[in-house]
Amino acid sequence: MADEENKPDDANAADEWEKMLAAGGGGEGEGDAETGRVLNQDEIDLLLGFDSKDKDGGDLSGIQAILGKSLMAYEKLPMLEVVFDRLVRILSSSMRNFTSDNVDVSIDSMTSLRFDDYLNSIPLPALLTVFRAVEWENFGLITVDSSLIYSTVDVLLGGRRSQRPIRIEGRPYTTIEQDIVKNLVDIILADMSSAFDPLSPVTFLHERLENNPRFATITRPNNAALLVRLRIDMDDRGGIVEILLPHTTLEPIRDLLMQIFMGEKFGQDSVWEKHLGKEVRLADVDVLAVLSEKTVPIGDIVRLKVGSTILLDATPQSDIWMQCGDVKLTKAKLGRMGDRMAVSLIEPVSRAKAKELT
């Protein structure tokens, strides 16, 4: 009896569910607003800015576009392309000398991203080198992928050239492989210093080598960073080197990186500056020889007549002051040369007193 009584209730509940599902899957319009239609996965992805159909390119939308506004694109720093183009030329020559093989270095990409996103994207195993920019007082990161590590070891240890791709193993790197990577990174850091030298002299020094990306944290996770991917090809072998420079590291030379061409000056002209300095040094300056000074009442000055005498607290042997305006330059002795009065300097003119004139 109980089962028979429950059958009508179950049938009614099923009918209600069918009506709700039909209303939820209906067309657009007022009916959707009244029934409170639930967003599907595609609409949610579009709102958040994740477009599964266009992963390789296209503009960001939604929340990702809002967050991406705080990232400074490398296009706003024109000198970065000049610096890394110079690095490619220098590094190509250095790698040929290092491997004694035909090496081709090229820029694969330059992008701006958040530091935490980069750490999460590093494929393991990999070797990460933390380096220090001495003059900028900050750090950077160089990542060498497994393909380039095994290719470099293969080339340096006399491996045969093969058309087959190098098998990437998941084992930890040996001491020999780590030493070879350290030597490779030292070459990259030296060439980076040379590439930045015309713009701003800087010294990059190897700090430490890490296997775990979480131990290579050099800035806050949400901080923006510049990622430069260099592709190094050695005939049929090679790999990728990634150079990460947080924007906080580049901040000391940010104004220089915003130049359109190397050597551009902001607010000054070196040619005009040299010309002005030369003309200032050739300018005529009136110098006074002050015998003595005395303070008298203004009433005595008013009563002065032709033939009046003012007594000074000085003798013919007293020192006199050489003065320019209100600035006393040095001491001198009063004398005579022919029919002219002359002075002989006792002390040299100090630079500190000369600067007061300017």
Image: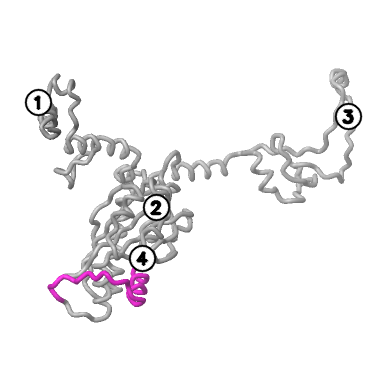
Residue 105, quarter of the rendered image? bottom left
- Where disc 2 sits, the SS reads loop
Choose mark 3 or mark 4, whichever is in front. Answer: 4
Left or right of residue 340, residue 272 in this image: left
How far across and how far down the image is residue 26, in percent?
9, 27
- Among the 4 quarters of the image, the one containing residue 232: bottom left
Residue at disc 1, secondary structure:
loop
> Which mark identifies residue 211?
4
Work out which quarter of the rendered image holds the C terminus and state it.
top right
Q: Is residue 256 left or right of residue 167?
A: right
Q: What residue is disc 1 on?
A: 27
Q: Is residue 183 magenta?
A: yes
Kind of residue indicated by mark 2? Leu
Q: Which residue is mark 2?
A: 199
> Which stretch appears magenta?
162-185
Pointer 3: what residue?
310
Spatial CA span between label 1 and label 2: 61 Å
Q: Earlier in the sequence, mark 2 or mark 3?
A: 2
Q: Residue at x 33, y 48 (%)?
A: 79
The spot of residue 297 in percent (x, y) is 87, 22
* Cα gap from disc 3 to disc 1, whole angstroms: 112 Å
Check disc 1 and give the amino acid type.
Answer: Gly
Front of the two marks 3 and 1:
1
